[in-house]
Image (cartoon, rainbow, N blue to C red):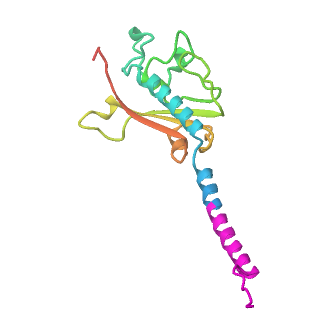
């Protein structure tokens, strides 16, 4: 009788195959790990977008006039930021922000609230910053003083850290989860 030769892999061939599969698997796992590390949490991204859209709607729904609307007869000129002398604040029931430019430099950290003062039911810690400025140049022949550039930035889980100060200089290199921008034109019925 002839000798039956068995077919199969030798021990060395098996070890080489396992090493190749192991190296390939490690490469795939490293790529997945990097993809997960640099992708924002979808829930955090959706929450940040909802916060930004709500705040942008609140800001852009305010008037943009030359005088403060709390006491138009006093003819207190509007400047960027709230009229502190009047006691304006976003949460005041009587002297809340009445003009778009009152929101310049406005920020919230910790518990975020809507315009009515209701806390947002959020998962994670968020911070907001609103920047309001006149554009650098005229736009389509409209004087730059008759336009406002609005920016709403939201920081949260998976994004860059809030710098602690809400100013154009501090936000220049910031990495928010969401940044919304808009232009607002002046409407002054008395003009």
Residue at x 55%, y 45% (from the top left corner): 174
Residue 51, percent from left and from top: 53, 29
Q: Which SS does the magenta portion mostly show?
A: helix
Residue 55, compared with residue 40, is above or below; it is above
Compared to 6, does 105 lie above or below? above
Is 140 located above or below residue 34 in the figure?
above
The quarter of the image holding the C terminus is: top left
Chain part drawn in magenta: 1-28
Q: Residue reaching furthest front?
A: 1
Which residue is at the front of the view, 85 or 80?
80
Place residue 140 in its image quadrant. Answer: top left
Instruction: Please tell me which residue lies in front, 155 or 15.
Output: 15
- Residue in view at x 43 percent, y 10 percent: 71
Q: How many marks?
A: 0
Query: For residue 13: magenta?
Result: yes
Quadrant location, the N terminus: bottom right
- Residue 6 location in percent, x, y? 72, 82
Is 89 included in the stretch rendered in magenta?
no
The spot of residue 134 in percent (x, y) is 38, 34
Left or right: 24, with 186 as reference point: right
Residue lying furthest bottom in this view?
2
Looking at this view, name the residue that lies furthest to the left.
141
Q: Residue at x 31, y 18 (%)?
A: 188
Front-most of residues 6 and 53: 6
Q: Position of residue 189 (x, y in %)?
A: 29, 15
Residue at 58 percent of width and 44 percent of height: 40
């Amino acid at each position: 009788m002839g000798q039956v030769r068995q077919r199969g892999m030798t021990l060395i061939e098996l070890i080489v195959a396992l090493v190749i599969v192991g190296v390939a698997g490690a490469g795939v796992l490293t790529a997945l790990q990097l993809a997960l590390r640099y992708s924002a949490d979808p829930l955090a991204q959706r929450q940040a977008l909802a916060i930004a859209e709500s705040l942008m709607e609140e800001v852009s729904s305010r008037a943009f006039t030359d005088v403060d609307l709390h006491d138009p007869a006093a003819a207190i000129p509007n400047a960027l930021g709230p009229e502190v002398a009047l006691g304006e604040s976003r949460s005041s029931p009587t002297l809340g922000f009445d003009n778009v430019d009152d929101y310049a430099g406005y920020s919230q950290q910790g518990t975020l609230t809507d315009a009515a003062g209701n806390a947002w039911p959020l998962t994670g810690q968020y911070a907001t910053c609103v920047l309001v400025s006149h554009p650098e140049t005229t736009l389509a022949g409209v004087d730059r003083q008759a336009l406002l550039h609005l920016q709403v930035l939201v920081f949260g889980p998976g994004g860059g850290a809030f710098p602690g100060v809400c100013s154009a200089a501090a936000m220049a290199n910031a990495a928010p989860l969401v940044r919304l921008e808009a232009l607002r034109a002046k409407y002054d019925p008395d003009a």
